[in-house]
Amino acid sequence: MKATPHADTLQQRDSEFIWHPYSAVGAGATAVPVVSASGVKLRLADGRELIDGMASWWCVIHGYNHPRLNAAISQQLDAMAHVMFGGITHPPAVALAERLVDITPAGLDLVFFADSGSVAVEVALKMAIQYWRSRDLSAKSRFIALRNGYHGDTLHAMSVCDPVTGMHTLFNDVLPQQLFVPPPGGPIDAPADPVDIEAMRTMLHKHAHEVAAVILEPIVQGAGGMRFYSADYLRHVRALCDEFEVLLIADEIATGFGRTGKLFACEHADITPDILCLGKSLTGGYMTLAATLTRRTIGEAISAGEPGVFMHGPTFMANPLACAVSLASIDLLLESPWQSRIAAIQSGLAEGLAPCASMPHVADVRVLGAIGVVELAAPVDMPTVQPLFVEAGVWVRPFGKLVYLMPPFVMSANDLATLTAAVVKVVGRLQIEGDRCTTAATA
Ligand SMILES: *Cc1c(COP(=O)(O)O)cnc(C)c1O
């Protein structure tokens, strides 16, 4: 057995050669070394354990190192790790596609596998564009998106992200110019604000001739602001898309598989999009896989147009290991009492985070399903705040003004209480200094 490298050494070796997500080169050796994980805990190189409040960016819904998911991968590994998908099929891909068609909103009956969320969004956008081209309406190639949205980091996906947090100014000359409507308001069971519906109607009225689709994250806007909005709004957008002959793309990469309390967030509004993107927790957080689902009629229309095929095919499309673990993850989810677990997490988050609401530097506290958000009045100063969470024994990774939790669904009430107490403690130590939320001591 190899010796576990000393934490500092690993951090330093990391900082010498590796770029981390959304990070600067030369920002110092700050990456926290994790050597193993099981259940809801991450184990650090120095032996400490952290309760994971992030589910590794929404993915790890059943916890780490789950025996059923491990077994699914091992079994598939014995059969084959990978085989190309061009001209070939295999049992896990077929079984997973059947399963996805079965559990997603009625009417989505065609599955295109992709290798990450951003790619699933690219595929969705290309499908929408190619659909209208095949119907001789090539002018319909732009997209309407909601402000505060997030759809991935590749260029076309970025073009439909929020223009400010998506840093459109930086890429202005290379990004396709899309159309944006104001983000709708909440709460989710409130009637849609007529102003929001009117904004979408006006946009469609003016631009439908050049618009391929409306793309949105149903009910929960994730990385673009962690906002929740009215299900009634979503119902209206569905109707407007039909009225103006524009497709509706629902990006459920973050919300799919139970996170909001429904299996898919579209169910809150009882709608079926024309194209649906899945990813993140699809594999239970074991590896990368995504899927873009659509209606058979859309697939047939694309196939009837020029060049007679859909022009996409990633090398690792429908990777067998990823499909096998996805199937096992979906089984595990549906066999579990997931609704009551998520309801319990929702009340645990609401109760546990409530003390933050009265803090002077906290703008809002909101909870939906297994998502808890503390929005601060100013962005978190990450270099000072990130270590405080680690010292408190939890893994919480804020971004901007948002300190948020999306725990694995299997988290016990005790662990959840420890997690929320740590957030209350750390947020309680912060204050606004200049334009940041930081600790009094280091200011
Ligand atoms: C994470 C995310 C993506 C991008 O997925 P990647 O796998 O990171 O490329 C797209 N849309 C939404 C809503 C997401 O949350």
Image (cartoon, rainbow, N blue to C red):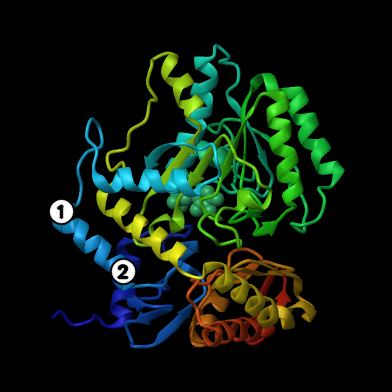
Q: Earlier in the sequence, mark 2 or mark 1?
A: 2
Residue nearer the viewer, 327 or 39: 327
Q: Where is residue 16 in the image (x, y as percent from the top left)?
A: 31, 65
Task: Locate residue 419: give its quadrant.
Answer: bottom right
Q: Where in the figure is residue 263, as x and y percent of width and height?
A: 55, 57
In the visual, does 348 lie left or right of 151? right
The number of numbered discs placed on residues in the rendered structure image is 2
Check if mark 2's residue and mark 1's residue have beta carbons within 8 Å: no
Q: Is residue 66 visible in this depiction of the protein?
A: yes
Above or below for 327 versus 113: below
Residues at marks 2 and 1, CA–CA distance in whole angstroms: 17 Å
Amino acid at the residue labelled 1: Ala
For the point 70% across and 57% down, the residue is 228
Q: In which quarter of the image is the N terminus?
A: bottom left
Q: Position of residue 435 (x, y in %)?
A: 71, 67
Local SS, label 1:
helix
Q: Can residue 287 be seen? A: no
Q: Where is residue 398 in the image (x, y as percent from the top left)?
A: 57, 69
- Pointer 1: what residue? 79
Instruction: From the viewer's perspective, tell me whether residue 268 is left or right of residue 314.
Output: right
Apparent side of residue 305 relative to residue 183 in the rendered image (left or right): left
Q: Is mark 2 on a helix, strand or loop?
A: helix
Whether 429 is drawn above or below 228: the answer is below
Circle number at residue 68: 2
The quadrant of the rendering that contains the C terminus is bottom right
Q: Which residue is drawn at 36% across and 78% down?
A: 38
Q: What residue type is labelled 2?
A: Arg
Crowding near the residue tagged with mark 1, few <14, some 14–19, many ≥20 C-alpha atoms within 10 Å? few
Residue neighbourhood size for the residue with mark 2, other residues' Cα within 10 Å, grouped as few (<14), some (14–19), many (≥20): some
